[in-house]
Amino acid sequence: MTTMAALDSERVQALSAAFSGSLLQGGDAGYDEARQIHNGLIDKRPALIARCRGTADVVDAIALAREAGLEISVRGGGHNVAGRAVTDGGLMIDLAEMKGMHVDAGARTIRAQAGVTWAEFNRETALHGLAVTGGQVSTTGIAGFTLGGGLGWLMGVYGLATDNLLAVELVTASGDVLNVNAETNPDLFWALRGGGGNFGVATSFEFQLHPVTQIVGGLIAHPFDAAGDVLHFYRDFTQTASDELTVHCVLAHAPDGSGMKIAAMALCHAGTAEEAEAEIAPIRAFGSPVMEHLGPMPYPMVNAMLDAGYPRGALNYWKSNFISELSDSLIDEAVTRFAATPSPMNAILFEHYHGAVTRVAPTGTAVPHRTVGYNMLLPSVWLDPADTDANIAWTRETYDAFRPSFAEGRWLNYLGDDEQIDAVRAAYGPNYERLSQIKRTYDPDNLFHLNQNIEPA
């Protein structure tokens, strides 16, 4: 690959003459800010950052990278924990300034560009009483989230974000601009619905929206010495949860900064207020909570209620896996492991997977994970670089301790930068070989490989 020193100024000047956005190199104002993504553990220096304003900029940036032999990375919201949005010494295609959105309230659809975050997306759709499954943290970008599947608070009733995808504008490795949907490019559209950034640069997305106005949601927390009982209750309660109700259970620290460990249930009910209050009544009645913040609220508020726990620039190292069941032994192990966590920002999270998301065939989209159950996530977060080794070690050791409970399957967007090919294959499951064939058609040279990569067949 071409190095930073080999990227001559003539090439950059030729591109900048027509470029709508900005081209940044080391030493330029804004370069250091642009190369920094959400995960502060990632520190890479691209030879060139192409801050695109439109699709034509993306086409030209790809052409320059191919001509100069530069490795390409693609940044949307920059939230992915693995940090694949940034290349060392290559060309970073930065879509963060592409913020266009248009809601068609009558058709209940939205077309949104790839730099939009879920907070921005929800602000526009909420004007019309509409929404779609978005990130569980609102600072997440819509692009990588959706291409990787997109699980969130509304998945029980409306499925994954990718299940609601109607079309994608895609710039391919050859520089072609395609409007990809189920009619124009059925195989490619299938692959984009969960296949990550393997097939090109997605510059905009069209989603089907759903009526969502007031929901009932929030958080209810119990003292940590009741954590085992909370997890047992959660396991039993979720066996009969309606599609409208998504409940996650988390071992975490109190959000007031006290450092007190808690066992909490975070929830979102998308039914009527009466249905919600009836269904969550057993949650309110259980145990002796130390904190309760449950009630009617706008959907964007639920989508942002965990944001403070994942500040931009904090250091992140995550591990996750689907689990076969929330067994007694797993519950005991989780309580024991969390008692020794080294950071007051770390958590052990169980995400309930049920409803509409599980009524799609495993091969219906590129996302194969369609079984009722739970995903276990260890989102480790800390602020002091001196604590990095301790937090990574705790996360890996905790993950290994949970292995006896693992089911097949890994969630694509939770994979870290140190995962191997077996993890990528586990994320794509039975769909990997078909994805590999489609990759060969649209990116035979694997130009787009800074992702959870699918090698061309």
Image (tube, rainbow, N blue to C red):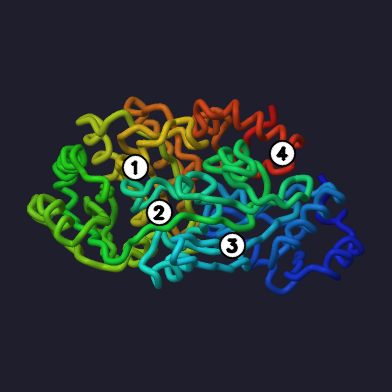
Q: Which three-letter amino acid code belongs to the residue tagged 3? A: Gln
Relative to 344, 21 lies left or right? right
Q: Which residue position holds label 3? A: 113
Rendered view: 327 above or below 297: above
**For the residues marked 1 and 3, what is the alpha-carbon distance in whole angstroms?**
26 Å
Instruction: Specify few, some or many for label 2: CA neighbours under 10 Å numbering under 14, 14-19, or 20 or more.
Output: many
Which SS class for mark 3?
Answer: strand
State the residue at coordinates (80%, 58%). Answer: 60
Q: Are marks 1 and 3 in contact (CB under 8 Å)?
A: no
Earlier sequence position, callout 2 versus callout 3: 3
- Say which quadrant the C terminus sits in: top right
Q: Which three-letter amino acid code belongs to the residue tagged 2? A: Thr
**For the residues marked 2 and 1, what is the alpha-carbon distance in whole angstroms?**
11 Å
- Return the mark for residue 133: 2
Q: Are marks 2 and 3 in contact (CB under 8 Å)?
A: no
**For the residues marked 2 and 4, what is the alpha-carbon distance in whole angstroms?**
28 Å
Q: Are marks 2 and 4 in contact (CB under 8 Å)?
A: no
Earlier sequence position, callout 4 versus callout 1: 1
Q: Position of residue 129 (x, y in %)?
A: 36, 67
State the residue at coordinates (54%, 64%). Answer: 116
- Return the mark for residue 356: 1
Which SS class for mark 4?
Answer: helix
Earlier sequence position, callout 2 versus callout 4: 2
Instruction: Specify few, some or many for label 4: CA neighbours under 10 Å numbering under 14, 14-19, or 20 or more.
Output: some
**For the residues marked 4 and 3, what is the alpha-carbon distance in whole angstroms?**
22 Å
Q: Which residue position holds label 4? A: 442
Instruction: Name the foreground residue: 316 vs 58.
Output: 58
Q: Are marks 4 and 1 in contact (CB under 8 Å)?
A: no
